[in-house]
Every structure is written in structure tokens, then in C-alpha cells.
Amino acid sequence: MRVHVVSDVHGNAEALARAGDGADALVVLGDLIDFVDYHQHEKGILGRLFGADKVKTFADLRRAGDREATIAYSRELWGSLDDPAALIEEAIREQYAELFGAMSAPTYATPGNVDAPWLWPEFAEGGIHVLDGDVAKIGGLRFGFVGGSLRPDGAPPRTSSAWTPYLRPHDEFAEAVAGLGQIDVLCSHIPPDIPELTYDVVTKRSEAGAPSLREAIEREQPRWALFGHVHQPLTERLRSGRTECCNVGHFKLAERPFVLRW
């Protein structure tokens, strides 16, 4: 069997259309949406709505790590629109129509934090399987899928934002992981909370990692644990017991799938 795995597509439908070439199946680990394009500021949903100059200002604030200033500027941008939520959903639907249309069959996909999973059933058809807290058998192996990222401890759910990322409470995420049972391949958007796998060497901070994923790896010892989310990881691969933990890469820029063979 040969399975290609991608994550962090962020709008790159052209490369996604080639991602399954030569493979028996394609696995997509989320972050389909191009919300903020930090490399080409005129692109992405923010670029479409506000233009390159304002996105550059937003990106510079994010890179500087000034959280309060970033939040204030973001509120200013959204406040300049009459109905930002409707405009965002329209832009997301346009991206999803192109991205899901680019997926080859069969595809097994789980959402990332920069996704709107409630819209996925509308676009997934023709051999595209949406899995989140579910198990699929591929080539005789059990693949378990858990999507989204973690809501920071103590942070309330967003109820009034124009855009709500797919962030889950720790207990809900852990319940989904535990429900997978014995699996051969653990597929998630975020990594297990192993420091070498969560640290981004460009942003110089640790991204979200799930204790429940690490515990499942220690308990179940699957052959592989596959994930994305961290675009420039300190370590792309490491072994935990018999499990090979692999960051499959930032597909938007690399445009190369991770290849799994057995």
C-alpha cells in the first residue's frame, strides 16, 4: 500500500489536486482554509476583505507577539464591516468548493483548527470520507482520526467573533482520542505534547500539543502517529516506543505529500 498524507493546505488547491498521484489513498489532516496568508498578504480571506497593507500590519503584530495590540487591531478590522461573519462564510465556501473538488478518491480527511467542520458534509462527496473521532480501515490497517486543536485552559468559547476556529476543550478532545481504541495509525491535526514536536523554530514558541495523543501513543503503541499544525518544527520525526511520530509537513509551501508505505 502507498498512502499520501498532507496537512496545512491553506488554500493550495492546485498542489492538492496532485497530492494523490500514484497513491492508493490520500489522507488530509486539516487546515484547508487560507485565512491569513503570511507570505502573500493580498491572498487569503483577510487579504480579500481588507487588502494587503492591512494584512501586513496584522501579520507584523502577530510576529512581534503583541497579543493585546493584535486583538485590538483585529477588532478594528472586523468592526469596519457590516456583516463580517457572512462575508467570511462566503469566502470559506468558495475555498471549500475548490479544495474538496481537488481531492482524489479515496480521501480520508479530518479538520484542523483553521477549518469550519460544520460545512464539510456539504462539500465531501465522491469518495471523500470525513472522519473526526472515527476509525477507517485502509489497506488492512486501522487509521484513527481526531480533528481540531485545543482551547487554552480557562479560555471561554468564542461566542461573538466573526470567525471561530475549531478549538476543543481538553476533555472533549481526550474523549475522542480514547474512543479510537486500538489503532495502527493515529491521525490528528495537532501533535502529541512532546516538546521537540510542538516547538516552531521560526515563531520561536511552542504550538498546541495534546497530552491525550501522547498518552494514546504510550498506551496503544500504533505503528505511526501522523500530524501537522507546526509549520517549522524543531523535529519532524521521532520515535516513542515502537511508534514513529511524523510531522507530515507544511503542504501549502512544500507542495509534497508525506508518503506512507507498507
Image (cartoon, helix red, strand yellow):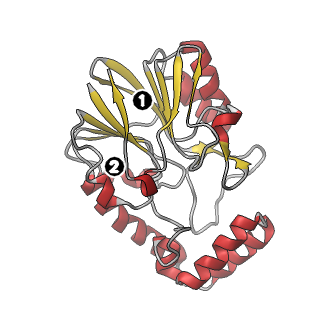
Q: Nearer the viewer, residue 161 or 219?
A: 219
> Mark 2 or mark 1: which comes first in sequence?
2
For label 1, count other residues whose C-alpha is less than 10 Å away and answer few (under 14), some (14-19) or many (20+). some
Instruction: Left or right? Give the position of 253 relative to 53.
Output: left
Where residue 56 sits, quadrant-wise, is bottom right
In the depicted structure, whether residue 184 falls above or below residue 124 = above
Residue 9 showing in the rendered view? no
Asked which secondary structure carries label 2, the reply is: helix
Q: Can residue 103 be seen in this view?
A: yes
| Left or right: 99 as drawn, with respect to 40 | left
Residue 34 image label: none
Which amino acid, mark 1? Asp
Q: Residue at x 69, y 55 (%)?
A: 203
Residue in front for this viewpoint, 24 or 99: 24
> In the rendered image, which quarter contains the C terminus?
top left
> Of 173 and 24, which appears nearest the observer?
24
* Above or below, 229 relative to 99: above
Give percent across and percent down for residue 143.
Answer: 39, 25
> Is residue 20 depicted above or below 43 in this figure?
above
Q: Does residue 243 sit above or below 175 in this rendering? A: above
Q: In which quarter of the image is residue 138?
A: top left
Mark 2 — residue?
121
2 and 1 marks in contact (CB < 8 Å)? no
Instruction: Kindly identify which numbered label has been placed on residue 134.
Output: 1
Residue located at (78% from left, 46% from top): 154
Q: Given the image, on which type of amino acid does mark 2 rest?
A: Pro
Horizontal and vertical percent position of residue 257: 37, 43
Identify the residue at image location x=45%, y=57%. Answer: 253
* Cα–Cα span, label 2 and label 1: 15 Å
**Quadrant in which the N terminus appears:** top left
